[in-house]
Image: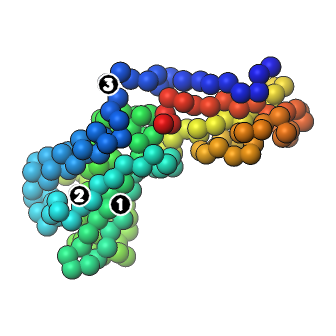
Amino acid sequence: MPTTSRSNGPHQHKTDEWPLERLETEIEHYVLDVLETYPEAFETLHRDRVDISVSRSLYRAGGYCESELDDPPSHQIVVSYPAYRHWGWGRVRDIVRHELCHAIVFERYGPDVDHHGSEFRSLADRVGAPVKGESPLPPRFELRCGDCERVVAGLYQASARTENPTKYRSDCCSMPLVVIENQSTYP
């Protein structure tokens, strides 16, 4: 049995998939569209106070918003490139609206507001954003028992176990590990 194999899984590489820089540009344009489409919801949120970035290493969420209550407030919205590769542009748009809601709720109610409380839910409903954040992405690496193929662990980053799986044993059968890498989601 081979110690390493590669799987594209159910999400094959898309021919229309954007590189990271293009995704960042599309998100920036989309933020402008959202602010123009929902001016009453985002009336105090100015585009020049929202920085957008895309991360190749954010796996456990589709995105997040970090806000500072300076004068004026500022927001950093980070979107996961692996999430885009896994879920596509439609879900990224949902993630962006969700994070913009976090930004405006933070501005209006301060840092002690319940992150997904009534204020957030009300605003998310008005702009068609999902209230709950995304589930974590599937792990980049699955470590399996070399005998019974039971999944022993899921890892988001390479480690000694993914680099040298035969040096490690499964708990179930005490057999060397096999690594399955999900390449379709991870750049």
Decide: few, some or many residues near mark 1? Use Cα within 10 Å; few <14, some 14-19, many ≥20. many
Q: Are marks 1 and 3 in contact (CB under 8 Å)?
A: no
How far is mark 1 from mark 3, CA to CA?
Answer: 27 Å
Name the residue: 41% across, 42% down: 81
In the rendered view, would you say 147 is above or below 140?
Answer: above
* Residue type pointed to by label 2: Leu
Name the residue: 24% across, 44% down: 25
How far is mark 2 from mark 3, CA to CA?
Answer: 32 Å
Mark whose residue sits in front, 2 or 1? 1
Callout 2 secondary element: helix
In the rendered view, would you say 81 is above or below 149?
Answer: below
Mark whose residue sits in front, 2 or 3? 3
- In the displayed structure image, the side of residue 149 where residue 43 appears, left or right: left
| Residue behind mark 3 | 16
* Residue type pointed to by label 3: Asp
Q: Residue furthest bottom?
A: 71
Q: Residue furthest right?
A: 174
Can residue 13 be seen from the camera position used here? yes
Name the residue: 88% across, 32% down: 175
Locate the N terminus and report the quarter of the image it occupies. top right
| Residue behind mark 2 | 123
Decide: few, some or many residues near mark 2? Use Cα within 10 Å; few <14, some 14-19, many ≥20. many
Mark whose residue sits in front, 1 or 3? 3
- In the displayed structure image, the side of residue 185 where residue 70 appears, left or right: left
| Residue behind mark 1 | 65
Closer to the chain start, of discs 2 and 1, is 1
Q: Position of residue 97 (x, y in %)?
A: 26, 50
Q: Quadrant of residue 27?
A: top left
Closer to the chain start, of discs 2 and 3, is 3
Front-most of residues 3 and 114: 3
